[in-house]
């Protein structure tokens, strides 16, 4: 028996990086997985890979900032596999932002729309879908930058910090209402994904680092453990939070950062 046998999971932004790793790990632990992503082809590719390996998955196009996409995603999960029991609000963007004094309102709002509004809409949809069912788990992917600050990312830090406290508010509401839904936030350090690659390219283009290779080494050195994280590192924590092994955890923050925030 897998650790997630009998569970139905929806993972957003699962066509790439951390979300892809979580979707694969969930399926290998026995969950039925809805692989959702802005990029329909990427979602279909990840789902097909899982199915080819003997797992249960379906791919779905979804923009987490659109309310109607949430209704459709939850309905699809229900139609394909039955009641939703796990939701991972993973989709996010991390643009290399301008300093606050020159950051445009449009850029600020875009980051908050995906990284915070998307988590709100997802958590709301998840509670509505799970409140009448058996044990549910909502996992909101924040960041070390939901715990500590940095430069060049005021919009990202604001959104990820808000996700941390929003998750606690949702956990308390669910507990008070008597719903068997746990809500926790997960805080990765730097993880080797396409998002990191794009960030390094952007920082290099803006002259913040001399080149992506030097930038990667500098970022790696921020992690006392001596390496960047992998999607598998985060997926292991996400399996734990989705499983009944974490039944006494809600409103908590799980930090998986190679020691980044230990200093
Ligand atoms: P990634 O490789 O860029 O994957 C993110 C996925 O989300 C992409 O497939 C992207 O699709 C999708 N996405 C973007 N906007 C979306 C939207 N509006 N609706 C639905 N899907 C959308 O990034 P990642 O590194 O795996 O990051 C996943 C999560 O972990 C993010 O929340 C990120 O902030 C967080 N995180 C990452 C790191 C890190 O170092 N990588 C560290 C801490 C936290 P497109 O490619 O089509 O845009």
Image (tube, rainbow, N blue to C red):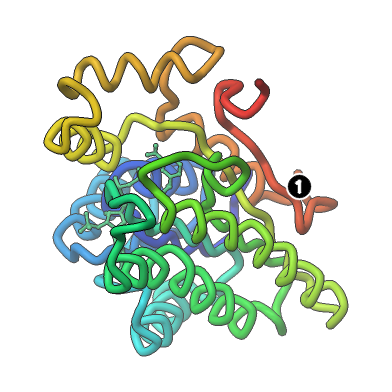
Residue 21 in picture, x, y percent from top left: 39, 41
Q: Tag count in the figure?
A: 1
Q: Which residue is mark 1?
A: 246
| Secondary structure at numbered mark 1 | helix
Measuring from the top left, give residue 17's x and y in whole percent.
32, 42
Q: Residue furthest front?
A: 101
Depth check: give the residue in front, 15 or 259. 259
CA neighbours of label 1 inside 10 A, class few (<14), some (14 to 19), many (20+): few
Position of residue 46 relative to residue 67, above or below, is: above
Residue at 43% across, 63% down = 115
Position of the N terminus by quadrant: top right
Q: From the Cβ of disc 1, is ligand 1 less than 8 Å away?
A: no
Q: In terms of depth relative to the viewer, which is nearer, 202 or 68?
A: 202
Nearest the camera: 219 or 175? Answer: 219
Q: Which residue is depicted at the point 71% across and 71% down?
A: 170
Q: Quadrant of residue 107?
A: bottom left
Image: 8 above or below 226:
below
Judged left or right of residue 233, residue 59 is left
The residue shown at (42%, 68%) is 112
Residue at coordinates 25% horizontally, 71% vertically from top-left? 61
Q: Report if residue 180 is visible in the image.
A: yes
Note whether residue 2 is visible.
no
Q: Position of residue 257 (x, y in %)?
A: 56, 29
Where's the C terminus, which quadrant?
A: top right
Residue 24 % position (x, y): 39, 43
Direction from residue 9 to residue 113 in the image, left or right: left
């Amino acid at each position: 028996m897998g650790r997630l046998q009998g569970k139905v999971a929806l993972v957003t932004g699962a066509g790439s990086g951390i979300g892809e790793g979580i979707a694969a790990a969930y399926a290998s632990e026995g969950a039925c997985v809805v692989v959702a992503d802005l990029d329909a082809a990427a979602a279909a590719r990840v789902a097909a890979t899982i199915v080819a390996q003997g797992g249960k998955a379906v791919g779905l196009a979804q923009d987490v900032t659109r309310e109607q996409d949430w209704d459709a995603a939850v309905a699809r999960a229900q139609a394909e596999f039955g009641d939703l029991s796990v939701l991972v609000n993973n989709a996010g963007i991390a643009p290399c932002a301008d300093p606050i004094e020159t950051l445009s309102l449009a850029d600020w709002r875009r980051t908050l729309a995906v990284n915070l509004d998307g988590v709100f809409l997802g958590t709301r949809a998840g509670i509505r879908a799970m409140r009448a069912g058996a044990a549910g788990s909502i996992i909101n992917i924040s960041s070390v930058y939901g715990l500590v600050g940095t430069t060049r990312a005021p919009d990202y830090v604001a959104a990820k910090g808000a996700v941390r406290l929003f998750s606690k508010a949702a956990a308390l509401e669910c507990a008070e209402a008597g719903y068997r839904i746990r809500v926790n936030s997960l805080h990765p350090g730097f993880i080797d994904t396409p998002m990191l690659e794009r960030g390094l390219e952007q920082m290099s283009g803006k002259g913040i680092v001399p080149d992506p290779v030097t930038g990667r080494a500098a970022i790696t050195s921020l992690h006392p453990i001596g390496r960047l994280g992998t999607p598998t590192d985060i997926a292991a924590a996400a399996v734990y939070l989705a499983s009944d092994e974490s039944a006494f955890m809600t409103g908590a923050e799980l930090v998986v950062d190679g020691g980044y925030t230990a200093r």
